[in-house]
Amino acid sequence: MKFKEYYSQKLSRQFLIPVITFLVLVFVILIVVSAEYAKSKVYQSETESALERTKEVKETIIQLIEQTQILAGIASEDIHVQNGYKSGNKNEHQKFINSQMNLEDFYEAIFLTDSQGRLIAHPNESAIGLDVSSYKAWKAIAEDNQESYIDKIPIISPVSKKPIIVIS
């Protein structure tokens, strides 16, 4: 019996060490493969989410540009704006700006300029007279005859001192 027990114990030890080593190796490989698979799924999910968000932002920008173009059309046809330009009465311009700011809560400011790029109407009347002719938006529309313009990088508002994106 002793001979049989001795060899069975020795064989079981010799057998168990490689089996345990093999199982640990398989377990580690499964963990690594699972982690990589999970990482790729998370990456794929985040990429899809980012693409969806990009589409939403693009749609919002398109809507803003359309609204700005509509607002510009309204401004060019508004009797207060026309009378203000004809008579030089800046109060007429201010009436239009104030009425539009009451309608539009999205914009920080809606303003009118003269042909030299100076503000002639603005919700914050202390900004009237500010020269915006150096703004990319002013140059794109007044000098390059673009129909609309939107800043790609926010600038600091000279009035509120907050980051803004100019939409013209």
Image (cartoon, helix red, strand yellow):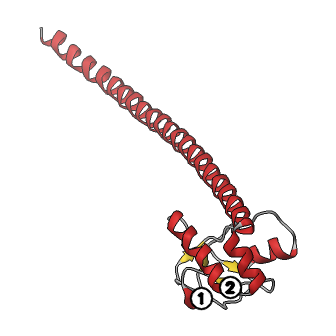
Q: Which mark is residue 127?
A: 1
Pointer 1 and pointer 2: residues touching (CB < 8 Å)? Answer: yes
**Residue 156, image x and y in percent?**
59, 81
In the rendered structure, the answer to whether residue 128 lies left or right of residue 131 reads: left
**Residue 81, image x and y in percent?**
70, 75
Q: Which mark is residue 150?
A: none
Q: CA distance from mark 1 to mark 2?
A: 7 Å
Q: Nearer the viewer, residue 151 or 105?
A: 105
Instruction: First in sequence, mark 1 or 2: give its number.
Output: 2
**Residue 111, image x and y in percent?**
64, 77
Q: Nearer the viewer, residue 55 or 48?
A: 55
Residue on which the image places disc 2: 119
Residue furthest to the right in view is 144
- Label 2 element class: strand
| Figure check: 159 above or below 97 | below
Q: Residues within 10 Å of mark 1 (few under 14, many from 20)?
A: some
